[in-house]
Image (tube, rainbow, N blue to C red):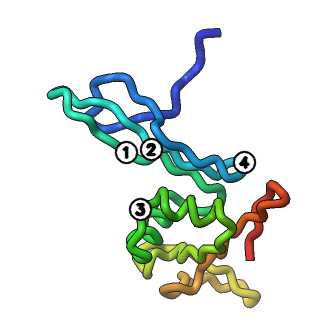
Amino acid sequence: MSQFHVDFDMDGASGEIYAKECYFIAKKVYIDILESVDKDGQIINANHIRMKSVPTSCIEYTSKEQELQPIDLYKDLFNGKKINFDLTEGGNNCGFKYEKDLTVRSYEESEFNRCIGFSKDVERIEVF
């Protein structure tokens, strides 16, 4: 007992941290907009982002590329839109591909993608 850990963490927060807006789309796919106060009493906000099989940095990269906030990406996913995530983040993130001839090479820019979409009728993730 007494081993409960709050998953919320914010840089610069000196008060209680709470979620003011959340989207829970599927198991291991959610976003929380966190709010707290800093040492000067000013309100600060942060995102708490999770998506199985897509790193948080890739979600933030895709948001910037589409000129959206991360919460807007999650709203689009919630409404049934399919979103393509470039896991190389425009060539800035390294990934490795194992070829059939047993060689290994790094992925080229935009070669390693995941298209994520959610069905409104069934609570499951679809990877295309």
**Which residue in the structure is indicated by mark 3?**
69
Q: Nearer the viewer, mark 4 or mark 2?
A: 2
Work out how far the residue at label 3 is from the one at label 4, CA to CA, in angstroms: 22 Å
Q: At x 56% / y 74%, what residue is drawn?
A: 85
Work out how far the residue at label 3 is from the one at label 1, CA to CA, in angstroms: 11 Å
**Which residue in the structure is indicated by mark 4?**
27
* Mark found first going from the N terminus, 4 or 1: 4
Q: At x 46% / y 60%, what residue is drawn?
A: 70
Q: Amino acid at mark 4?
A: Lys
- x and y percentages locating residue 84 in the rendered image: 59, 77
SS class, disc 1: strand
In this rendering, is residue 84 above or below 53? below
**Which residue in the structure is indicated by mark 1?**
46
Q: Amino acid at mark 3?
A: Gln
**Which residue in the structure is indicated by mark 2?**
33
Label 3 packing within 10 angstroms: few (<14), some (14-19), many (20+): some
- x and y percentages locating residue 33 in the rendered image: 45, 44
SS class, disc 3: loop
Label 1 packing within 10 angstroms: few (<14), some (14-19), many (20+): some
Q: Nearer the viewer, mark 3 or mark 4?
A: 3
Which of the 4 image quadrants contains residue 64?
bottom left
Work out how far the residue at label 3 is from the one at label 2, CA to CA, in angstroms: 11 Å
Work out how far the residue at label 4 is from the one at label 1, CA to CA, in angstroms: 21 Å
Relative to residue 66, is residue 114 drawn left or right? right
Q: Are marks 3 and 4 in contact (CB under 8 Å)?
A: no
Q: At x 60% / y 78%, what residue is drawn?
A: 113
* Mark found first going from the N terminus, 2 or 1: 2
- Quadrant holding the C terminus: bottom right
Q: At x 44% / y 76%, what residue is drawn?
A: 66
